[in-house]
Image (spheres, helix red, strand yellow):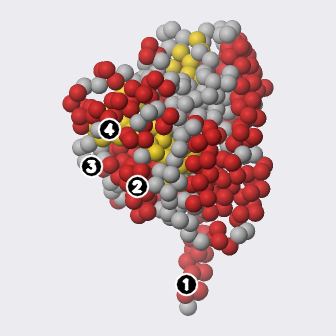
Amino acid sequence: MYWDWSVRSYASMLVRSENPSVRESERTIVRTTMIYSKRIQNLPPYPFAELDRKKQEFKAKGKNLIDLSIGDPDLPTPEPIVQCLQEAAAKGANHRYPPYAGTTKLREAVTRWYLRRFGVRLDPFSEVLILIGSKEGIANIHYAFVDPGDIVLVPTPGYPVYPVATKFAGGIPYLMPLHKTNDFLPDLGILPDNIAQKAKIMHLNYPNNPTATAAPQTFFDGIVQYAKQHSIIVCHDAPYTEIYYDGHRPHSFLESKGAKEVGIEFHSLSKTFNMTGWRLGFAVGNADIIKGLSQIKMNVDSGQFGAVQEAGILALDHEEKLTPAIRHVYQERRDVFIEAMKKTGFKITPPKATFYLWAEVPPGQTSASCANHLLEEAGVVVTPGTAFGEAGEGFIRIALTAPKEKLEEAAERLVSLL
Ligand SMILES: *Cc1c(COP(=O)(O)O)cnc(C)c1O
């Protein structure tokens, strides 16, 4: 009988879905009766909605768009990592729940890599936690340490997850502006004392998205002192440490003396190995902070697929062999594009790291008007700086996530705009 019911129900569903007017009215009912949480009602509008709409409009007109707005590598994951996953996916042991903190073998691979790459020693059992992509950990950390009304220090312009996840946990984001005049580093000297006293967490992100700057170790040293003085947990988001230029290798926050007493670092395989779709990252550093995050995670997820973790071990153990080729591609793209852009009115400082360029818009334009102009007149899609917060006004972000030839063509189109 159950089967009969199911077939009939399925058939009637098919009929209804063929009739768009019925579907539309059903959607309307959902929209008017569903009351979303304040959490969702208070979400800022999706910053790319207008741009997405314009992009679709231009594509529909058959225009040849060059999209330089995407913060996701266009390059494939290196073949050995893919092969490792294919074999690991067939192993029965990987079909079961993985350990909550991640497999011991991957946590050990993380400690090996941190020692080789940064000279930082970590205990794989208490100072490493595997994440389902670092965004997951960055969002969840607030539930472990932020109570309603607590302040969280957030860089702006910056990754929207820091302020949004702060609010989800009932916290209040306090914005730390990143100005060109201060090399896009937050100025701790201007943070009011009462704010510093009440702050639970400080988010930092170097090499930085969207400003493409790297932080000197002396900056991290100062952060450690400040965090100790005010009992603030430092969360350093570091997914771009392996995307750098001219041989300038970025530092880890944990290289600073005393950093492990005050903070953790979020890392990700997403950008380092072109693995954004795989969802694999990790948090390393202070054992008490790691413990708090793991207690939240234990109650909301059950870890990343064991086979993906196995492939992650191969990636980290062979990082030195895998990443030079990836960096080479970005270096070429950056150099070609910056050279071609010299003939335009844009002032672009060549980035030291990340696959972004943070360009000042020409005089008399805003981020939005500039991005619109480039889309409408040249078919080049860039991200207005304001998508990363109001402090991004006056800038656009250009992503080097397109082939060299496309970047050259984009630059040519921009030159002819003059
Ligand atoms: C890409 C990115 C991440 C990494 O996200 P995953 O969830 O690990 O894919 C984190 N922070 C910033 C600023 C990023 O740009």
Give the foreground label among 2 and 3.
2
Going from N to C along the chain, the mark reached first, 4 or 3, is 3
Image spot of residue 134 (x, y percent): 52, 47
Contact flag, marks 2 and 1 (Cβ < 8 Å): no
- Which residue lies under the disc numbered 1? 5
Image spot of residue 168 (x, y percent): 35, 48
Q: Which mark is residue 147?
A: 3
Kind of residue at badge 1: Trp
In the image, what residue occupies the spot 46% across and 23% down? Answer: 218
Q: Check disc 3: other Cα within 10 Å, few if <14, some if 14-19, many if 20+.
A: some
Give the foreground label among 2 and 1.
2
Going from N to C along the chain, the mark reached first, 2 or 1, is 1
Q: Which mark is residue 232?
A: 4
Q: Cα distance, mark 4 to mark 3?
A: 14 Å
Q: Cα distance, mark 1 to mark 4?
A: 58 Å
Kind of residue at badge 3: Asp
Secondary element under disc 4, as helix, strand or loop, is loop
Observer able to see residue 168: no
Q: Nearer the viewer, residue 165 or 376?
A: 165
Kind of residue at badge 4: Ile
Secondary element under disc 1, as helix, strand or loop, is helix
Contact flag, marks 2 and 3 (Cβ < 8 Å): no
Give the foreground label among 1 and 3.
3
Q: Which mark is residue 291?
A: 2
| Residue 269 in the figure: left or right of residue 172 | right
Going from N to C along the chain, the mark reached first, 1 or 3, is 1
Q: Nearer the viewer, residue 174 or 326?
A: 326
Q: Which mark is residue 342?
A: none
